[in-house]
Amino acid sequence: AQSVAQPEDQVNVAEGNPLTVKCTYSVSGNPYLFWYVQYPNRGLQFLLKYITGDNLVKGSYGFEAEFNKSQTSFHLKKPSALVSDSALYFCAVRGYDYKLSFGAGTTVTVRA
Amino acid sequence: EAGVVQSPRYKIIEKKQPVAFWCNPISGHNTLYWYLQNLGQGPELLIRYENEEAVDDSQLPKDRFSAERLKGVDSTLKIQPAELGDSAVYLCASSLGTWTGEDTDTQYFGPGTRLTVL
C-alpha cells in the first residue's frame, strides 16, 4: 500500500521569503504525485502533479515541486511567499489501484 | 466551467438519524469519488465510481453507509443511522478517468459537506 508523510505540521515564513513544504512517499512502481491546497471551509484545490519527465514540475499560483526518486521526496516550493498562500497543503500519491493517499497536511502561515 | 457541486454545505443532525449528501461532478467526468476528511487529517477514500459502477468500495462501512450513481452523473452518499463518530467533512471529487494522462486522472474536489452529529 502507498503512503505519504508530511513531517512538518506547520511552516511559518515571512512574506517575500522562500517557502518549502516537505513530502516523502512510499509506493510500489512508478509514483504519481500530487499537491493540493485547502483554504478554510473550502475543498481541495489542485496545484500540480508529477507523472514522468522533468523532475521540476511547475503548477498554479507560482508553485513548483521537485521530484527526487533517490530520496523518495516531492517537496513543494515557492520562491517568494505571499500572505494569501497561508493555507493547508496536502501531498498525495496515487497507487496502482488509482486511489489517492494523502498526507496529514501542513499548515502554512505567511506573516506580513 | 462549473466545478464539482455539493449540497448541503453544512448539516447538523442527532445521532441515529439518517442523512444524505449530494454531488454533481464536472461535466464529462466519468470517475467520481467520495472522501471522508476528519479534522486535522487528509481525506480518505470511501468509494470510487466509474460511470455508474462502484469499482472500489472497500473502505465504505457498508453497515451504515450507502452510495449510488444511478445514471452515471450525480451521486448520493447516505448514512443511516448516523453516529457521533461520523462527524466530519464529506468531500466529493471527479476526474475525466483513471488512466494516466496530462489531466485525465487529476481529481477535482467540491467544497465538501460538513456533518455534525449531536
Image: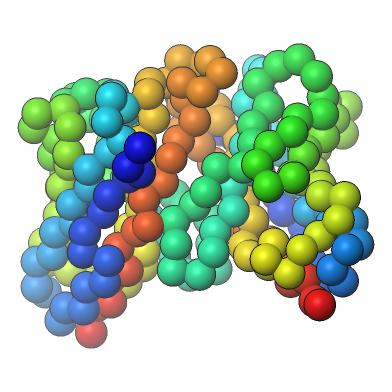
- The answer to which image quadrant residue B112 occupies is bottom left
Q: Where B50 sits versus B109, above or below? A: above
Q: Between B82 and A56, which is closer to the camera in this rendering?
A: A56
The residue lying at 28 percent from left, 77 percent from top is B116
Q: Position of residue A72 (x, y in %)?
A: 80, 33
- Residue B12 appears in the figure: yes
Taking the view exactly as shown, the residue that stands out farthest to the bottom is B118
| Residue A12 percent across, percent down from the top left | 81, 71
Residue B108, x across and y down, in percent? 43, 40
What is the tally of numbered marks visible in this picture? 0
Give the residue furthest to the front: B1
> Vertically, is A82 above or below B26?
below
Using the rendered view, name the quadrant where residue A18 is placed: bottom right
Res. B46 visible in picture: no
Q: Above or below — where is B59 with respect to A57?
A: below
Q: Taking B9 as reference, is A35 left or right? A: right
Q: Position of residue A2 (x, y in %)?
A: 60, 34
Quadrant occupied by the C terminus of chain A = bottom right
* Lateral position of residue B56 relative to residue B99, left or right: left
Q: Nearer the viewer, residue B19 or A78?
A: A78
Q: Residue at x 78, y 53 (%)?
A: A21
Vertical side of A40 occupied by B103: above or below = above
Q: Is residue A5 left or right of residue B115?
A: right
Q: Residue at x 22, y 47 (%)?
A: B23
- The residue at the point 26 percent across, 71 percent down is B10
Location of the N terminus of chain A (image quadrant): top right
**Is A65 positioned to the left or the right of B114 in the image?**
right
Structure colour scheme: rainbow
